[in-house]
Amino acid sequence: MDVNPDKLNAFMGKMVGDMGAAANAALIKVGDRLGLYKALAAKGPMTPAELAKATGTTERCIREWLSAQAAAGYIDYDAASGKFHMQPEQQMAFADEDSPVFIGAIGDVMSAMVLDEPKISEAFRTGKGVGWNDRAECLFCGTARFFRASYKHHLVQEWLPALEGVVDKLERGATVADVGCGHGISTRLMARAFPNSRFYGFDAHEGSIETARKAAKEDGLAERLSFATATAKTFPSHNYDLVCFFDCLHDMGDPVGALKHVAGTLAKDGTCMLVEPFANDRLEQNLNPVGSMFYAASTMICTPASMAQEVGAALGAQAGEARLREVARQGGLTRFRRAAETPFNLILEARA
Ligand SMILES: C[S@@+](CC[C@H](N)C(=O)[O-])C[C@H]1O[C@@H](n2cnc3c(N)ncnc32)[C@H](O)[C@@H]1O
């Protein structure tokens, strides 16, 4: 083996950074669960003892957590005062649930990947997949909270207006299905924005539908927004003007079957909106930090979820526009275009 020492040093340097990031994923979850980021952001520079007092935690544990987070660059340390603080950008990322870049929930998603690793490794052997119903509980709320930032800042403002004629219909009064809606965050955002329209959220996971129902009731939206447990191939038809799939078509075992069903439930000239993780069409175009994150999540979450269902198409989170266009065509939705994109999402419009 001909090892180049410079290349080896560079590679191990990268790995030290990556290992630090991976280890700090658990600390993000600790900070999120115990309200450490939020307390630090709200109260300004604090010593470990002050943060421990403010959050009802133990000073020694907090000191170690703060030191690790400062070494990672997630919070800042001032050696002169011995205090830790968060810059506005760090607060936006970890402490402010309403910010467009909130990633404080990522610890939930990461820990679900690690907790479920034995099941996933076994599924590598059997090829049988691991269903969404069979995952660690924190995956459901982590996913919902993680995606909320994008939906809150893009869905009504940019994504729906990018679809041909859809906002006019929603303002006049349209019928909308949100398929694979999870906790229904996207459904509730749309229902709040378009009071003349009627919304239906469907998901195969009973626990998520219960959470969505409760939230809709608390929001006072229950009259025009209902949630039901149903799969993408069996949800009832209400002549929809718009059927949405938020980050879930690729999780489904039979995405072609799902879109065939959609084609049969759409009103004349109705629209299907697919929100999918951003990906280019070829693997070599996705070998970058966004691809690294999405392929990892796809390996541990999306691909096994699809393989646990009928057909088991396993599109993966990085299917890309060309593959999704083909899935839509096979489902009978032949008018297809990229309506919008963000660094993390493709927004695709599909019509019969
Ligand atoms: C990654 S989550 C996305 C949830 C939600 N749309 C969001 O953006 O927060 C994928 C969702 O698809 C649902 N799902 C997977 N396969 C399904 C199927 N065949 N029919 C209906 N829902 C399905 C899962 O239960 C899960 O709630």
Image (cartoon, rainbow, N blue to C red):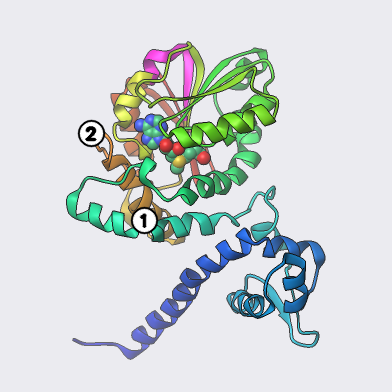
Quarter of the image where the N terminus is located:
bottom left
SS at badge 2: loop
User: Residue 216's x, y, as percent?
Assistant: 63, 29
**Residue named by callout 2:** 311
Drawn side of residue 192 relative to residue 234, left or right: right
SS at badge 1: loop
Residue drawn at (51%, 66%) of the image:
26
**Residue named by callout 1:** 116
> Which region shows up in magenta?
262-273
Quarter of the image where the C terminus is located:
top left
Task: Confirm whether residue 276 shows in the render.
Answer: no
Drawn side of residue 98 relative to residue 317, left or right: right
Magenta: main secondary structure: strand
Q: Does the residue labelled 1 lie within 8 Å of ligand 1?
A: no
Residue 162 is one of the magenta-drawn residues: no
Residue drawn at (35%, 84%) of the image:
7
**Amino acid at pointer 2:** Val
Residue drawn at (64%, 40%) of the image:
152
> Who comes first in sequence, dot 1 or dot 2?
1
